[in-house]
Image (tube, rainbow, N blue to C red):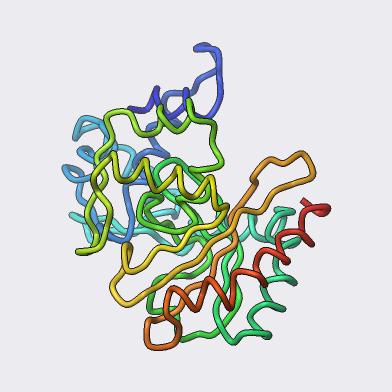
Amino acid sequence: MIAQRGAISMAINKADFIEGMAKGLAVLESFDTERQRLNATLAAQRAGLTRAAARRHLLTLTHLGYLETDGGYFWLAPKVLRFSGSYLASARLPRMLQPTLNRLAAQTSESFSAVVLDGDHVVIVARSGSARVLAYGLHLGARLPAHATSTGRVLLAARSRSEFNAWMKGRELPRLTAYTTVEPKKFRDIIAQVRTQDFCIASQEHELGVHALAVPLRNMDGRTVAALNVVAAPQRLEARAMETGLLPLMQEAARELRPML
């Protein structure tokens, strides 16, 4: 598992690969919204390690201040926010996108996010809008399943067909709601449609009561570097109304951003 994680991110010589660091990060990444507290057994299962190795990493991360513990279970400590805080303060992409997100939110009173793809998930790197959608988990740094989100589908559609086929190979698509697309053929058809129409609407596939619309954000070379999306509850905006009312605004924003990306 850990070797694959390194191979996916970049090619690296075996002599340059620090196994211990990879294992420690795998343990740290084992904590998520589904499992906020882990013991050594659960961490080992999630990180693909032995229980003894997972325990040593948990204790080390606790000693360094990245985890807290009651002696049996471990959970993330506030110190882990140093990583996200440093990224958001220094990364060029969120700073470039934030004024546009603010403007769109002020125009429409809806909530907008900028999202990038990270493996099986999308990650929110910038957002603006009403606090009412915080219940949906759309906070900075939130990780959402790519297959069930409008942004994930836009970003997957931007991949070459061979890259997308590799992403799909042997993959199970978890069902999150009664509306989630989990059949591989149907999902492939959806991605093909997104490639053609250059936007995506996902209705209640990630969470009940939420419609989402996304468009790609491309640079001057035509490469998709992120996705722009808006979310709304059904009682505020039907999916069709999103396409007619918000899509043109978002497409225009994407065109304006292109020279800066």
Image: 81 above or below 52: below
Q: Quadrant of the N terminus?
A: top left
Query: Which of the 4 image quadrants contains residue 188?
Result: top left
In this view, the residue in front, 138 or 167, is 167
Q: Is residue 226 left or right of residue 179?
A: right
Give coordinates of residue 44: x percent, y percent: 22, 38
Give coordinates of residue 197: x percent, y percent: 55, 53
Q: Is residue 223 left or right of residue 162?
A: right
Image: 196 above or below 200: above
In percent of the image, x 55 and y 19: which residue is there?
Answer: 11
In this view, the residue in front, 154 or 35, is 154
In percent of the image, x 34 and y 39: which residue is there?
Answer: 57
Query: Which of the 4 image quadrants contains residue 228?
Result: bottom right
In percent of the image, x 49 and y 70: which residue is there?
Answer: 139
Give coordinates of residue 247: x percent, y percent: 60, 69
In percent of the image, x 25 and y 31: which residue is there?
Answer: 49
Q: Residue furthest right?
A: 259
Give coordinates of residue 76: x percent, y percent: 37, 58
In this view, the residue in front, 229 or 90, is 229
In this view, the residue in front, 218 or 190, is 190
